[in-house]
């Protein structure tokens, strides 16, 4: 469409905007595709405000694929100096849509947010980055490896943009530790490496030398113990984070979740017998896991948690050692055998 005169393209853009405002479902997808194509080759003037306003409405569209289509068009605008800053009014809407969006939409939204953040300055940048950092860990477990990779990388970037708000920043950083430690075992090597870099960055932010050393030297099997030893009061929070990973489509992540859940279960045993029993029930539910190494580890961990407690004090360190040995035996055996 570059061959068309600029005035004609501007007229077509105006007419498409008016058509899309009518929200006629029979035409909106085709019209949005044409509009997006025109925007790629047209220097926008007065039309820009109308286009941005229209995009804000269509970010909430229930039409299949529409959000991704709009986000791609927004991304194009953010990459052009003449139009980039006018798109910033859409940033709150894009952030809000992250949680309920499908993987395809998230995969486009994350680069848009990354580009928009770099257009902000000062306190606005800091507050926006902090809000976004609080939402991104929920995407670490997305079924799409692209989303996992982009969300983890963007999370680390956001931490570097935050100034002040130290207490809130540390809360966000702490909540990211366990998911990042799980994804050190991600089957996608790029995601695993991004997780290691992010975990190392968070550990340095928290001035947690031991954790930073474990991340840097890839001693992943010690990280769960390190987290619980440092923040025992967060055991229940960690448990809530680990349970969804028991249903992960990735066998290595399920195995890590079983191992960590066992550590938490023993920690809670002395405090809440009923909760430890609930954990055992969850672990027994993995007896039919399609991967034998996961099912065997889950059953063995449940049996350890249910075993009568000896009269002599059984230390948390001893438990970690016992569970670690069981995990290593499972890990060394052929997968699925």
Image (tube, helix red, strand yellow):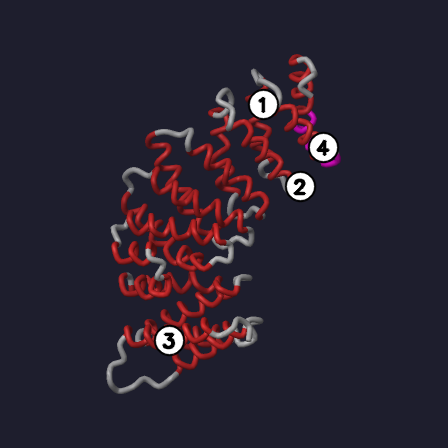
Marks 4 and 1, the one that precedes in the sequence: 4
The residue carrying mark 2 is 63
User: Of the residues under marks 4 and 3, which one precedes in the sequence?
Assistant: 4
Q: Is residue 264 left or right of residue 40?
A: left
Viewer-closest of 336 and 79: 336
Secondary structure mostly seen in magenta is loop
Instruction: State left or right for residue 79 relative to residue 168.
Output: right
Q: Give the mark nearest the N terminus, 1 or 2.
A: 1
Residue at mark 4 to residue at mark 3: CA–CA distance:
59 Å
What element does badge 3 sit on?
A: helix
The crowding category of the residue bearing disc 2, from other C-alpha atoms within 10 Å (few below 14, some 14 to 19, many at least 20), is few
Callout 3 environment at 10 Å: few (<14), some (14 to 19), or many (20+)?
few
What stretch of residues is rendered in magenta? 19-26
Q: Position of residue 250 (x, y in %)?
A: 53, 62
Q: Position of residue 47 (x, y in %)?
A: 59, 19
For label 1, the residue is 50
Instruction: Say which label, 3 or 2, has the lower sequence index.
Output: 2
The one of 194 and 1 positioned closer to us in this rendering: 194
Could you say which is closer to the camera, residue 266 or residue 254?
A: 254
Q: Which residue is mark 3?
A: 325
Disc on the earlier residue, 2 or 4: 4
Query: What's the distance in space between the residues labelled 3 and 1, CA to CA?
Result: 63 Å
Which numbered mark, 3 or 1, is in the foreground of this view?
Answer: 3
Residue 306 in the image: x percent, y percent? 40, 82
Give the foreground label among 4 and 1. Answer: 4
Q: Quadrant of the C terminus?
A: bottom right
Marks 2, 4: nearer the viewer: 4
| Tag 3 near tag 1, CB within 8 Å | no
CA distance for labels 4 and 1: 18 Å
């Amino acid at each position: 469409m570059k061959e068309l005169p600029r005035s004609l393209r501007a007229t077509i853009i105006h007419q498409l905007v008016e058509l899309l405002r009518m929200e006629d479902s029979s035409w909106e997808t085709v019209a949005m595709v044409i509009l997006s194509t025109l925007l790629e080759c047209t220097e926008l003037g007065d039309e820009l405000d109308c286009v941005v306003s229209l995009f804000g409405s269509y970010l909430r569209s229930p039409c299949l694929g529409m959000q991704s289509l709009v986000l791609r068009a927004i991304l194009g605008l953010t990459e052009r100096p003449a139009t980039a800053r006018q798109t910033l009014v859409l940033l709150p809407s894009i952030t809000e849509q992250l949680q309920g969006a499908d993987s395809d939409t998230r995969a486009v939204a994350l680069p848009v947010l990354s580009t928009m953040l770099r257009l902000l300055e000062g306190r606005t940048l800091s507050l926006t980055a902090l809000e976004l950092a609080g939402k991104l860990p929920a995407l670490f477990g997305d079924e799409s490896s692209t989303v996992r990779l982009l969300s983890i990388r963007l999370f680390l970037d956001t931490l570097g943009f935050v100034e002040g708000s130290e207490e809130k920043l540390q809360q966000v950083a702490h909540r990211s530790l366990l998911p990042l430690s799980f994804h050190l075992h991600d089957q996608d090597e790029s995601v695993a490496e991004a997780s290691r870099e992010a975990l190392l960055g968070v550990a340095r932010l928290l001035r947690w030398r031991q954790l930073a050393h474990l991340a840097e030297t890839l001693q992943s099997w010690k990280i769960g113990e390190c987290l619980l030893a440092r923040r025992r009061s967060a055991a229940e929070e960690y448990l809530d984070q680990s349970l969804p990973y028991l249903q992960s489509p990735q066998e290595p992540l399920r195995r890590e979740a079983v191992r960590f859940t066992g550590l938490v279960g023993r920690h809670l045993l002395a405090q809440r017998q009923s909760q430890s029993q609930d954990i055992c029930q969850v672990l027994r539910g993995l007896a039919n896991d399609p991967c034998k190494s996961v099912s065997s580890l889950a059953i063995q961990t449940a049996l350890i948690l249910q075993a009568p407690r000896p009269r002599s004090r059984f230390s948390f360190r001893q438990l970690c050692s016992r569970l670690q040995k069981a995990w290593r035996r499972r890990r060394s055996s052929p997968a699925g055998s």
